[in-house]
Amino acid sequence: MMALRSRMREQHLFENKPEPNFAELLDLVALGTVADVVPLDQNNRILVHQGLQRIRSGHCRLGIKALAEVGKRDLSTLQAADLGFAIAPRLNAAGRLENMSLGVELLICENMELARRLALDLDSLNQTRKEFEQEMKAEALSICANLPSLAQSEQAHGIVLYQADWHQGVIGILASRIKDQFNRPVIAFAQESEESEYLKGSARSINGVHMRDLLEHIDMRHPDLIEKFGGHAMAAGLTIHQSKLDLFKQIFDQSINAIIEPEQLQGIIYTDGELNAQEFTLANAEMIRQGGPWGQHFPEPSFEGEFSILQQKLLAGKHLKLMLQSEKGQLFDAIWFNVDVRAFPDLSIKKARLVYRLDINEFRGEKSLQLKVEYLKYI
């Protein structure tokens, strides 16, 4: 921050105006960094940490306070994950479904009553966004199920999806969900507008495939195929004419096939190993929480192990609540967020190898250890 202030002084940006207190902007810096999935290098971790400190102490925008209330998050213990999963989605919902002005209005609001009303409006938009996403994901999975190459052992290298009634503001989330499920680069298209003959696409990639560079390569070899594109390694946007969709699908898959290695498609999960019986403690979960902020390129530690599954049931129609027993006989509550409800609960699964994180469940002021499941492979 001192270097930034010095640079701005060199550029004479403070002439005839008072120098701002940059610390007062750290809540926005933390929110923006996490919401935009910016890599948490050393500098960004410092900024996010300091921003979270200000938010927890109440020195933040009223809009952030209101969104935390709506998202049922305790401001005094807010984590980077809360910014990413509770606050940012509601804030972004306005831009996805209508326009971003509602979100901007909330962040500059100076009246708490108004901030709460705006936050509720954004929460309603976010619920609508979730409904769109759920419908679109079901349709996308149906399309994928009918792709011959995905039904074979030699799966498709790239997935391109399109349906005429998909909402343009949700295709980025859709592409991300399908990418996570199949571990393939994915582009989801929607119509630019009802009258337009052009399609706008949102792309999400996997490690080893630089999406923007790939699109540039395609554009150089087929200059009439893509109207415009932009982005970075893991995400990009593009526009094509509707009549060229089938050709684009073919070329996209061929282009990925030419650069990718088979092992990159296997979806390898790296963990921090197994925990022994003495390491399953609330104190260790607290220590990991305090070691944050965690995020892009600085992931929270994850672990693996074999467990017996004693109970499983759906919560809120989309999360799987489990009772697990370790090989040493320890019992654990566990939660698996946004599970594939077509596959779970599956009461036939009695034992599984899990990838999980140590998590803290807080209920009525009491804290207890729970495991947050990231992946399950039945044994």
Image: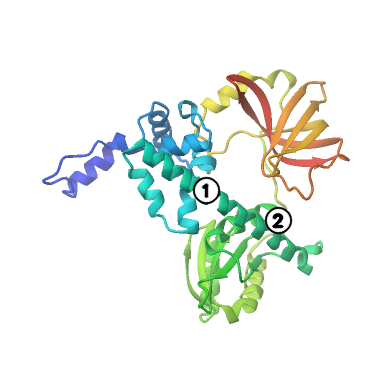
> Does 339 appear above or below 311?
below
| Mark 1: amino acid | Ser
Answer with the quarter of the image where residue 47 lies.
Answer: top left
Q: Nearer the viewer, mark 2 or mark 1?
A: 1
Answer with the quarter of the image where residue 155 lies.
Answer: bottom right
Answer with the quarter of the image where residue 183 lies.
Answer: bottom right
> Does 130 appear above or below 136?
above
Q: Residues within 10 Å of mark 2 (few under 14, many from 20)?
A: some
Which residue is at 79% across, 35% downward? Answer: 312
Placement of the C terminus among the 4 image quadrants = top right
Total numbered labels: 2
Residue 155 in view in this figure: no
Which residue is at 79% across, 48% downward? Answer: 343
**Where is mark 2, residue-wise?**
182
- How did the renderer colour the structure? rainbow
> Does 163 appear above or below 375?
below
- Mark 2: which secondary structure? helix
| Mark 2: amino acid | Phe
Q: Position of residue 297 (x, y in %)?
A: 53, 43
Q: Position of residue 239 (x, y in %)?
A: 51, 72
**Where is mark 1, residue-wise?**
124
Q: Position of residue 56 (x, y in %)?
A: 42, 28
First in sequence: mark 2 vs mark 1:
1
Q: Residues within 10 Å of mark 1 (few under 14, many from 20)?
A: some
- Extreme-right residue of the structure: 348
Specify the label residue 374 is tagged with: none
- Mark 1: which secondary structure? helix
Left/right of residue 250 with respect to residue 6 in the rendered view = right
Q: CA distance from mark 2 to mark 1?
A: 30 Å
> Does 302 appear above or below 182?
above
Left/right of residue 126 with respect to residue 103 in the rendered view = right
